[in-house]
Amino acid sequence: MLPDTDFLAGKKGLVVGVANSHSIAAGCAQAFHAAGAQLALTYLNDKAQKFVQPVADSVGADILLPLDVTDDAQMDALFETIREDWGTLDFLLHSIAFCPREDLHGRVTDCSRAGFAQAMDISVHSLIRLARRAEPLMTNGGTLLTLSYHGAEKVVDHYNIMGPVKAALESTARYLSVELGPKNIRVNALSPGPLETRAASGIDHFDELIEDAKARAPLHRLTTIEEVGAMAACLVSDFARSVSGNTAYIDGGNHVV
């Protein structure tokens, strides 16, 4: 954990993708809050709100609104509220990924056209849509963060089609970093090791993936959402003002072996 200081005081950030208090996005929101940032959070739908509301309350979120990233009207309404309430935005965390179960659990060779298109739209193009709307609000520069995984770089058993999808996400982050750099908007990806979250549990043979990570990583343990949050808070802060286009690994060193 980062120390409870105010190095993000005065900064305003949007966190997209909190599922519950155990999600990576929740760990990041807690770290942003501990460092003094004002936050806006989103929830997918009415069913999800009851799981996100406690997180929003715990970080004193100024804004909590629904956001299905496939709904342009909801996305427009979210950014209009941020513009009206805050006027500016300093950072945005994109922690969104989805793939239909039958495609996620099958071979890349057998992935359906519809499943691939949906996974790319929700997991990758949603970052582009958010960036486009965030750009005019980042009048003093800012930071965009997204969540990736080592399966984007190396073939990981049972990660299947999400490997190519995350590879596209990391590449998108690099291209955004170049396009938005002249406006002092930095773009980076976070790549945690496997965490025991609800989203990750959808991966086939996930228990095996967890045990393999523990065995292979130099630190021989799993990453925590608090540790991912600490890295996220650092990257959106002025401490990392020259860091852009990077993929930051928070995996106990697993990516090097």
Image: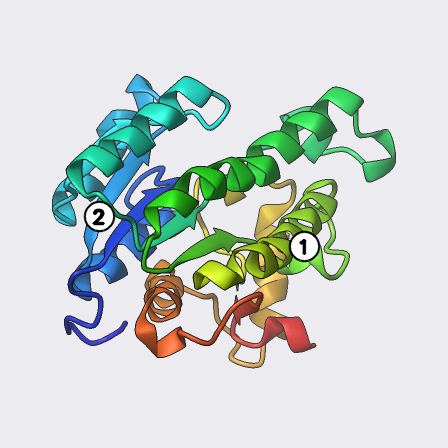
Q: Amino acid at mark 1?
A: Ser
Location of residue 5 with respect to 78 vertically, above or below: below
Residue 60 location (% of width, % of height): 12, 46
**Horizontal side, residue 154 vs residue 83: left or right:** right
Give percent across and percent down for residue 46: 29, 18
Query: Quadrant of the rendered structure where residue 34 is?
Result: bottom left
Element under disc 2: strand
Q: Nearer the viewer, residue 64 or 129?
A: 129
Residue at 26% across / 28% down in the picture? Answer: 65
Q: Mark 2 or mark 1, which is nearer the start of the sequence?
A: 2
Is the C terminus in the top left, top right, bottom left or bottom right quadrant?
A: bottom right
Give the residue pinned by disc 2.
Answer: 39
Proximity of marks 1 and 2: CB atoms separated by less than 8 Å: no
Residue 202 is at least partly visible in this image? no
Residue behind mark 1 = 171
Q: Quadrant of residue 110?
A: top right
Residue 104 position, x and y percent, is: 68, 34
Q: Alpha carbon of mark 1 to alpha carbon of mark 2: how far? A: 27 Å
Q: Position of residue 15 (x, y in %)?
A: 33, 45
| Amino acid found under the numbered disc labelled 2 | Leu
Secondary structure of residue under mark 1: helix
Name of the residue lying farthest toward the right: 109
Badge 1: residue crowd in 10 Å (few <14, some 14–19, many ≥20)? some
Q: Residue furthest bottom?
A: 218
Residue at 44 percent of width and 40 percent of height: 198
Q: How many neighbours does mark 2 have within 10 angstroms: few (below 14), some (14-19), or many (20 or more)?
A: many
